[in-house]
């Protein structure tokens, strides 16, 4: 009887030890998976945010050419080409905005991104050099606001 009890205690101890080991390993695996998920999410966000900023800067640059071409000749082929490039850059910036919307849960960050895109679009409405410079300043500030908020979002 004593031997059977000792065997039963040994089996119970082994099972309890195995179960405890399983729980610790599961917890460690869950932590590793959560860490990896946070890391991948951060990398995706960094790529989306920086891609958006890059696209808006290229779009802003493309907004200059139609303005200057319009001053030289209203219906010149150069103006048509400059407008086409500006539209193309806007499309790329909008695609980048969609990526930002997909990877963030921060509605304020999305609003800042939309504001940066809109401020850049408004550069096309400039009628003279001072109004263009004013529009450029607003577009730069809007993008800067987005980048600052995106940086904060990445660090949290």
Image: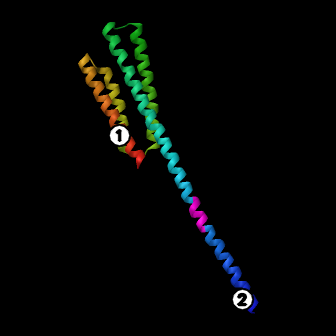
Q: Position of residue 132 (x, y in %)?
A: 28, 20
Viewed as shown, does residue 120 lie left or right of 130? right
Front one among 58 and 83? 58
Position of the N terminus by quadrant: bottom right
Q: Which residue is mark 1?
A: 148
Q: Residue at x 25, y 24 (%)?
A: 134
Q: Residue at x 36, y 35 (%)?
A: 114
Mark 1: few/some/many CA within 10 Å (<14, 14-19, 20+): few
Query: Which picture quadrant has residue 112?
Result: top left
What number of labels is visible?
Answer: 2
Q: Position of residue 41 (x, y in %)?
A: 50, 46
Q: Is residue 44 magenta?
A: no
Mark 2: few/some/many CA within 10 Å (<14, 14-19, 20+): few
Q: Residue at x 44, y 38 (%)?
A: 100
Which label number is shown at residue 69? Answer: none
Report the magenta stretch's main SS. Answer: helix
Q: Is residue 98 above or below residue 16?
A: above
Q: Is residue 40 above or below residue 67?
A: below
Q: Residue at x 57, y 61 (%)?
A: 28
Viewed as shown, does residue 79 lie left or right of 6? left
Q: Which residues are magenta?
A: 23-29
Work out how far the residue at label 1 is from the one at label 2, CA to CA, in angstroms. Answer: 68 Å
Query: Which picture quadrant has residue 79?
Result: top left
Point out the tag, 1 or 2, that comes first from the N-terminus: 2
- Colour logic: rainbow
Q: Position of residue 155 (x, y in %)?
A: 41, 47
Say whether residue 115 is visible.
no
Hey, which residue is sitting farthest bottom in the picture?
A: 1
Which label number is shown at residue 5? Answer: 2
Dot 1 falls on a residue whose secondary structure is helix
Q: Position of residue 110 (x, y in %)?
A: 38, 40
Dot 2 falls on a residue whose secondary structure is helix
């Amino acid at each position: 009887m004593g031997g059977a009890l000792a065997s039963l205690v040994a089996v119970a101890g082994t099972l309890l030890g195995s179960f405890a080991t399983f729980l610790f390993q599961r917890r460690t695996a869950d932590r590793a998976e959560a860490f990896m998920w946070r890391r991948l999410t951060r990398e995706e966000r960094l790529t989306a945010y920086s891609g958006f900023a890059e696209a808006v800067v290229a779009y802003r640059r493309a907004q200059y050419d139609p303005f200057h071409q319009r001053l030289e000749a209203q219906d010149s082929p150069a103006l048509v080409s400059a407008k086409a490039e500006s539209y193309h850059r806007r499309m790329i910036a909008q695609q980048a905005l969609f990526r930002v919307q997909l990877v963030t849960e921060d509605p304020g960050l999305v609003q800042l991104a939309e504001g940066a895109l809109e401020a850049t679009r408004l550069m096309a409405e400039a009628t003279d050099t001072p109004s263009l410079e004013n529009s450029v300043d607003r577009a730069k500030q809007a993008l800067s606001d987005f980048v600052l908020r995106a940086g904060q979002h990445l660090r949290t």
